[in-house]
Image (cartoon, grey):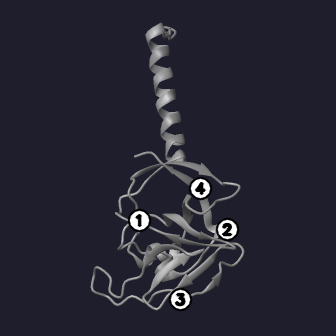
Amino acid sequence: MPKPLTLEFRNWRLWLALTALLSAGTLLPYKFSVTLTPSLKHRVYWLIRNPDRVARGDYVLFRHRELTSRVGMKKSEDVLKIVGCNEGDQLTVDCQKRFYCNGDYLVRAKDISLKGEPLQHFTFNGPVPAGFMFVMGQHRDSYDSRYFGFVEKSRIKAKAYPLF
């Protein structure tokens, strides 16, 4: 007859440690985001999923399949940017391709990408439509709303807080 299995105290610690590691492994990716592109200054972000609202200056994680495929991101459809101009704010673009939100300078669009390809910049003057936002990166070569236009707020997956 087989001998019954007896669990000693050290076995319980092992099981507790394995359970904690498994829990952390499933929950942490849902709470953190890491960006490897130079588009933003920070690399690691704490995420608050399904935020009630976002404001100008907030970091947002949003889904944008067309954008990620255009820039060659094959493993993810998520993009992390800053809300530069929010719904209802006045977005203007001058003849030198400089973007302003409520009169505050945001960024300037370029004519040529780092790969040497010509860039079409977004042209718009007026209030940002309801349910939309103008997003941007912090690097001058960031591919953002300067080129692809407004992003629907319904695409937002999380509000992000930079850690480091």
* Pointer 4 local density, CA inside 10 Å: few below 14, some 14–19, many at least 20: many
Query: Residue 105 appears at what percent x and percent y?
Result: 49, 73
Residue 146 location, x and y as percent?
48, 80
Q: Are marks 3 and 4 in contact (CB under 8 Å)?
A: no
Looking at the rendered structure, the secondary structure element under dot 2 is: helix
Q: Which mark is residue 33?
A: none
Q: Which residue is denoted by mark 4 in the rendering? A: 158
Which three-letter amino acid code belongs to the residue tagged 3? Thr
- At x 55%, y 49%, the residue is 47
10 Å crowding of disc 3: few (<14), some (14-19), many (20+): some
Q: Earlier in the sequence, mark 3 or mark 1?
A: 3
For the residues labelled 3 and 4, the Cα–Cα distance comes to: 27 Å
Provide the secondary structure element on which disc 3 rests: loop
Q: Is residue 115 left or right of residue 23?
A: left
Residue denoted by label 3: 123
Q: What residue is drawn where x is 48% and y is 39%?
A: 25
- In the displayed structure, does residue 9 sit left or right of residue 87? left
Q: Are marks 1 and 2 in contact (CB under 8 Å)?
A: no
Residue 64 appears in which quarter of the rendering? bottom right
Residue at (54% x, 53% y) in the render: 160
- Tell me the kind of residue under disc 1: Gln
On residue 154, the disc is 2
Looking at the image, do the residues carrying marks 3 and 1 touch, with CB atoms under 8 Å apart?
Answer: no
Rendered location of residue 92, percent (x, y): 56, 83
Q: Nearer the viewer, mark 3 or mark 4?
A: 3
Q: Which mark is residue 138?
A: 1
Q: Residues within 10 Å of mark 2 (few under 14, many from 20)?
A: few
State yes or no: discs 4 and 2 in contact (Cβ < 8 Å). Answer: no
Q: Amino acid at mark 2?
A: Ser
Which residue is nearer to you in this view: 84 or 113? 84
